[in-house]
Image (spheres, helix red, strand yellow):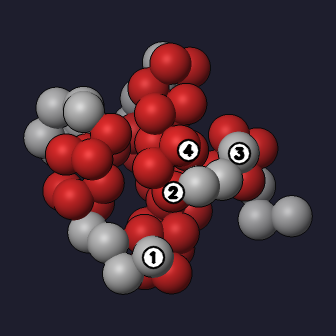
Amino acid sequence: MLLERIKELCEEKHMSIAGLEKAAGIANATIRTWDKSNPRIDTLQKVAAVLECSINDLISKE
């Protein structure tokens, strides 16, 4: 669910997952592992900052 939501937000920003990872300063292919593992909160904060949203926006559509 988290991975799908991040993909949606990336599409809205016309950004790839790889571009998001680079902009957030996290390792390549990190986000794609989140369908099977849970990210650290500090990593979620970096992703949210790049996507200009809250962590809550990352984990839910509402």
Q: Residue at x 26, y 69 (%)?
A: 16
- Amino acid found under the numbered disc labelled 4: Ala
Q: Residue 32 in the image: x percent, y percent?
A: 28, 48
Q: Are marks 4 and 2 in contact (CB under 8 Å)?
A: yes
Q: Quadrant of residue 10?
A: bottom left
Tell me the residue that label 2 is attached to: 51
Q: For marks 1 and 4, give the CA distance.
A: 12 Å
- Amino acid found under the numbered disc labelled 1: Lys
Q: Are marks 2 and 1 in contact (CB under 8 Å)?
A: yes
- In the image, taking residue 5 as reference, residue 60 lies left or right, namely right
Q: Residue 52 in the image: x percent, y percent?
A: 59, 55
Which mark, residue 48? 4
Classify mark 4: residues with Cα within 10 Å, few (<14), some (14-19) or many (20+): many
Which mark, residue 54? 3
Q: Residue at x 53, y 43 (%)?
A: 49
Q: Regarding mark 2 in the picture, which secondary structure is present there?
A: helix
The image shows residue 56, relative to residue 16, as above or below, that is above
Q: Residue at x 55, y 30 (%)?
A: 45
Please tell me how many numbered marks the rendered image carries.
4
- In the image, taking residue 55 as reference, residue 17 lies left or right, namely left
- Amino acid found under the numbered disc labelled 3: Ser
The image shows residue 2, relative to residue 13, as above or below, that is above
Query: Which numbered disc, 2 or 1, marks the residue that appears first in the sequence?
Result: 1
Q: For marks 3 and 1, give the CA distance.
A: 15 Å
Tell me the residue that label 1 is attached to: 13
Q: Residue at x 52, y 32 (%)?
A: 44
Q: For marks 3 and 2, give the CA distance.
A: 9 Å
- Amino acid found under the numbered disc labelled 2: Leu
Q: For marks 2 and 1, give the CA distance.
A: 7 Å
Q: Are marks 4 and 3 in contact (CB under 8 Å)?
A: yes
